[in-house]
Image (tube, grey):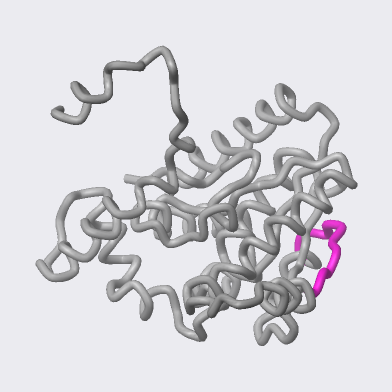
């Protein structure tokens, strides 16, 4: 049984401890999309640090159909926020990469990477630490952009599934519309579940119990998990102290 109150309280205490050790007096800076994850992380930071030490950054790429949800969140929490339209930056990068046809995946992943650069630009100017807003379910199947929404200075919710996040959101008293808003990457025009090919309910059950009814979906989840583990690992680096160990390691 998931104890949402205990997990929320533990997470709040962890955030306070992080800032005491890694940013005494600093602000938490959060990219606010209007979805449940950024809403919950922002609410956790407000409870941990106070609304005056939480800064939201709204980053539409031109028009954003659901930006009203982001405004709902910052107004509900009463936090300072900035709106930075990243459209010109995204288009400028695309326009200035000359002589190379950009792949569809490149074009989809560029906005999250520009958003992360924007978050750090704001963070360094407000004495901040950038919050990662990923959850366990997304991380399990690599549903994030490397050096985009997959990174940050601290990650409060990376051990909670989508189902568990929703329970924490309710304990925090967030508007139900933010908690139950259909998750979407804001890039493809589809929901997360449409893109992934399975529901978060199926994924969460598989993560926590190892049970899943559809073998095809099991295979897809397992494949995505293995393929995307590198997103959760430190960058590989050459270690001269292991010189000569490579051949042996390759046979393990």
Residue found at x 76% / y 50%? 120
Residue found at x 26% / y 65%? 202
The quadrant of the image that shows the N terminus is: top left
Kindly tell me whether residue 28 is visible in this rendering: yes
Q: Position of residue 152 (x, y in %)?
A: 63, 45
Asked whether, in this view, residue 38 is left or right of residue 102, the answer is: right
Quadrant of residue 81 in the image?
bottom right
Residue found at x 71% / y 22%? 21
Residue found at x 47% / y 47%? 4
- Of residue 122 and residue 111, the one placed in the foreground of this image is 111
Q: Position of residue 92 (x, y in %)?
A: 75, 75
Residues shaded magenta: 76-85
Q: Position of residue 251 (x, y in %)?
A: 14, 29
How many numbered discs?
0
The relative height of residue 77 versus residue 83 in the rendered view (above or below) is: above
The relative height of residue 82 versus residue 97 in the rendered view (above or below) is: above
Q: Position of residue 133 (x, y in %)?
A: 58, 53
User: Is 204 within the magenta?
Assistant: no
The relative height of residue 244 versus residue 49 in the rendered view (above or below) is: above
Kindly tell me whether residue 171 is visible in this rendering: no
The quadrant of the image that shows the C terminus is: top left
User: Is 83 within the magenta?
Assistant: yes
Which residue is the extreme one toward the top? 241
Asked whether, in this view, residue 250 is left or right of residue 87, the answer is: left
Asked whether, in this view, residue 21 is left or right of residue 50, the answer is: left
């Amino acid at each position: 049984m998931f104890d949402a109150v205990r997990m929320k309280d533990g997470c709040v205490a962890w955030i306070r401890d992080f800032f005491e050790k890694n940013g005494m007096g600093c602000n938490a800076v959060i990219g606010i999309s209007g979805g449940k994850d950024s809403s919950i992380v922002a609410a956790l930071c407000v409870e941990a640090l106070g609304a005056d030490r939480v800064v939201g950054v709204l980053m539409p790429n031109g028009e954003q159909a659901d930006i009203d949800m982001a405004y709902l969140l910052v107004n509900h929490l009463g936090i300072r926020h900035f709106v930075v339209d990243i459209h010109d930056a995204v288009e400028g990068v695309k326009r200035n990469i000359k002589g190379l046809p950009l792949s569809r995946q490149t074009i989809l992943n560029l906005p999250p990477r520009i958003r992360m650069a924007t978050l750090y630009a704001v963070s360094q100017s407000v004495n901040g630490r950038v919050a990662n807003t990923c959850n366990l379910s997304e991380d399990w199947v690599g549903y994030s952009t490397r050096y985009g929404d997959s990174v940050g200075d601290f990650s409060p919710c990376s051990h909670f599934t989508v189902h568990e996040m929703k329970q924490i959101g309710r304990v925090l008293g967030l508007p139900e519309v933010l908690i139950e808003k259909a998750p979407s990457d804001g890039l493809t025009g589809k929901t997360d579940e449409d893109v992934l090919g399975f529901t978060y309910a199926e994924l969460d059950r598989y993560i926590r119990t190892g049970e899943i009814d559809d073998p095809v979906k099991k295979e897809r989840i397992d494949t995505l998990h293995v393929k995307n583990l590198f997103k959760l690992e430190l960058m590989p680096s050459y270690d001269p102290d292991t010189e000569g160990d490579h051949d042996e390691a390759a046979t393990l």
